[in-house]
Amino acid sequence: MFSVITCIRDDHDWRLVLAAAAVCLIGAMAAMLPLSRAQECDAGRRKLWIGASAFAFGTGVWATHFIAMLAYDGGMPISYQLGLTALSFLLSVAGSWAAILVASKGRGRFSSIQGGVLMALGIAAMHLTGMQAIETQAEILYDPYMTVTAVLAGALLSSIAFHAFFHLKGLRRLLASSITFVLAICALHFISMASITLVPDPGKEVPATVLDTSLLATIVVVAATALILIAIAVAFFESHLTDLRGLANASQEGLLILREGRIIDTNERFQGLSGWKLADLSGKAPSIVLTAVQGQNRPGETLLKTRNGREIAVEVNTSRIVYRGHNCDVLAVRDLTERRQAEEIIEHLAHHDVLTDLPNRSLFDKRIRQALQMAKGKNSEVALFYIDLDRFKTVNDIFGHAEGDRILCKVAAILRRVAHERDTIARLGGDEFAIIQSAGQQPAAAQKLAAAILDEFAAEMDMARDPTAVGVSLGIALYPADGSDPDEICNNADIALYRVKHGGRGKACFFNAEMDEATRARRQIESELRHAIIRNQIHVSYQPVLDAQSGEISGYEALMRWNRPGHGLSEPDIFIPIAEESGSIVQLGEWVLQQACKEAARWPDPLRIAVNVSPVQFMLPNLCERIEAILKETGLAPARLEIEITEAALIRDRDRVMATLQRLRSLGVHIVMDDFGTGFSSLSNLRTFPFDKIKVDRSFTGMLEHDAAARSIVRAIIGLGHSLGMPVVTEGVETEAQRQIVVEEGCAQVQGFLLGRPDVEPSIKLAGRESLLASTA
């Protein structure tokens, strides 16, 4: 040990010794960086990274040796053979490669030892070859014991370095392994140098083709520094490019890179989507897989031809980038399968009832118009059945919604069995069904179908033995005898149903002119509604709307209530349709809007207030002006008002309603699509007007816990809202399970009896905007 220290102190220039150690440390760190990268790659890339690591390490070892040799002063001039000097470099790189390869194949203790031994032998071979390259008038004598000691020290320290590299992480791995390798290289070199003795031999000739020390110093410093910097740069750029490619492969879009109209590269997503490999597509035109491509920055839909012959609907967007030094086109290919499926679900939802899968009111209205038009052209007759279930509300209240849903599905099955396949069976809402009978001689065909329905109900729904059984009442109107247009036929079928329900139930009744008495009750309601505001019979209740994640109150919905004299509290579903038909909804709706805005303006927190606006109100040419006047009068900021509109408002005069909505939006008022998924839901409406919210109808919420299809539909609606940037509100949340489901599906806001019932004094709940979830948990 003392001889080594003496050798370094007396025979070496300590400044160059420090330079050698610094170069050695840089080389070791440059080797550890690609070796770290090799552990994260597949087998093919791992070999490349191990080669880069070995090259950097071998260069560092070689440069360390010769810089240290430049620091050595043996008392006589020294020069070096060119051939052996070059061979020593090759031995250094080859030995490093063999050692790293062996150590990397296994991660056990013996792998590190084997790698350390090979590394020491490689360094020793380089050292001895480098020493043999010395040309001087002296003989070099070695102490074999010191030489073996140097190799053993190098093997021990190299094994420790490999062990540290494969068992440590992060910066500790880099520093510990690099420093230990530096110690191994320096120990082997300087112990070996301490073991040599130069015996002068004046008669020995020095060849002419040698490298003097100054030239060697220049070559070593420049070459070593350049090679190590190149190794570091390669590691950095390869890592950067690999990460960028990994980022491209993580994209949900398939990417095609085109140069001069030919495919040169793809990401993994495109290969997985199409089934084609890059080798199959390289050099080909994109038309081999895409039927059409839009122009620059213009997304368009086309078909992707997969390797197995299928065609997938995709959206392609083209952009231009610089790739591998050339201007290239990038085709971003997005799979539209899920979107199309969602659109199909929504489109089906727009025309079919969720529970029974029967046509809903939207499709029913279309079918009745078609049926009457065809009957008019053929001079034939059409029978329209309005069907209502007896005792259904009682059964639903006593046995619960799940049992009520089962009954509705059973009723749908009965109607399907007895009706002709050409007849249209529809569920209009709740327990209301309808049948359009287009074939047969009337009224005989209608009488036969009515008798079949009553008989089937009598057989399937025995109320004497089954407490959940329900009865059925039928109102029938004939075209053209009972009306000349769809509205009149529907109204008369409804009058016939109204008469049978109030005349004994469980029967079928054809409309006749003597049924005017049935309309008198409705006219009575119309008359009372006109005076309900003056008589203080109408009031507004407020139901909270909560943020689905935090549970905080984000606003309230204003709900109209009518305390009808002699009848108690009337449900909105009863009197609002009559108010709409009579036109009194205009006065009632404006009064509710004014009261709601006045109430909201008094709240200490700037929460939003939602108010339903009837389709009839949207027919008013001055609706926008009236809303603006109410906002100014009450002092409520427009951004705090939400106008809820159903798609029924878009049916009568779509252009006028859209224009009104645009004017309201320009005022700052928020527009919400209410009861989405029922009635006239259409994707075109969402595309035409950017609604601020979509509200999922309560009829879907009630089925979430028991019906997987309902959950799928709610998921589709929420997903559609997310894709269009529209928050989704779920109404009718009555159980904690329902709330959990819609929150998991990503719903933004929730509303229902679980979270808060309508209250006439909402302002007392607003302090602190507390969460209602804690009180309902």
Image: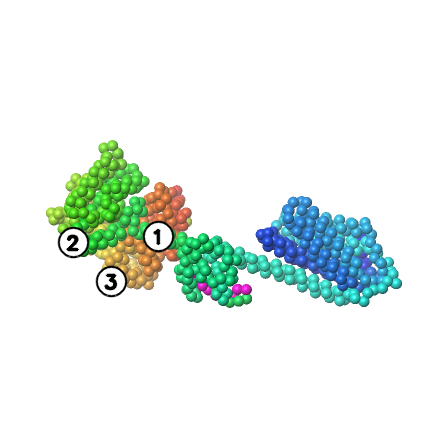
Residue under pointer 2: 379
Foreground tag (1 vs 3) = 1
Foreground tag (1 vs 2) = 2
Q: Residue furthest top?
A: 465
Residue 102's spot in the image, x, y percent?
A: 67, 49
Give how far apart the Cα atoms at labels 3 and 2 are.
Answer: 44 Å
Residue under pointer 3: 622
Asked if the residue at tag 3 contacts the one at tag 1, i.e. Cβ–Cβ closer than 8 Å, the answer is: no
Give residue 344's mark: 1
Q: Is residue 204 left or right of residue 761?
A: right
Q: Is residue 317 magenta?
A: yes
Residue 386 in view, yes or no: yes
User: Three-letter amino acid code at disc 2?
Assistant: Asn
Residue 723's spot in the image, x, y percent?
A: 39, 55
Q: Is residue 718 magenta?
A: no
Classed neighbour count for the residue bearing mark 2: other residues with Cα under 10 Å, few (<14), some (14–19), many (≥20) = few
| Residue at 15% from the left image edge and 46% from the top image edge | 443
Task: Tell me where the magenta segment starts and ends, as one range.
Answer: 316-324
Counting residues from the start of the chain, the first of labels 3 and 2 encountered is: 2
Q: Is residue 391 above or below residue 349?
A: above
Judged from the image, the secondary structure of the residue bearing numbered disc 1 is helix
Residue 745's spot in the image, x, y percent?
A: 40, 48
| Residue at 75% from the left image edge and 53% from the top image edge | 124
Residue 5 in view, yes or no: no
Tell me which corner region of the image, top left, top right, bottom left or bottom right, holds residue 445: top left
Tell which of 735 and 362 is nearer to you: 362
Classed neighbour count for the residue bearing mark 3: other residues with Cα under 10 Å, few (<14), some (14–19), many (≥20) = few
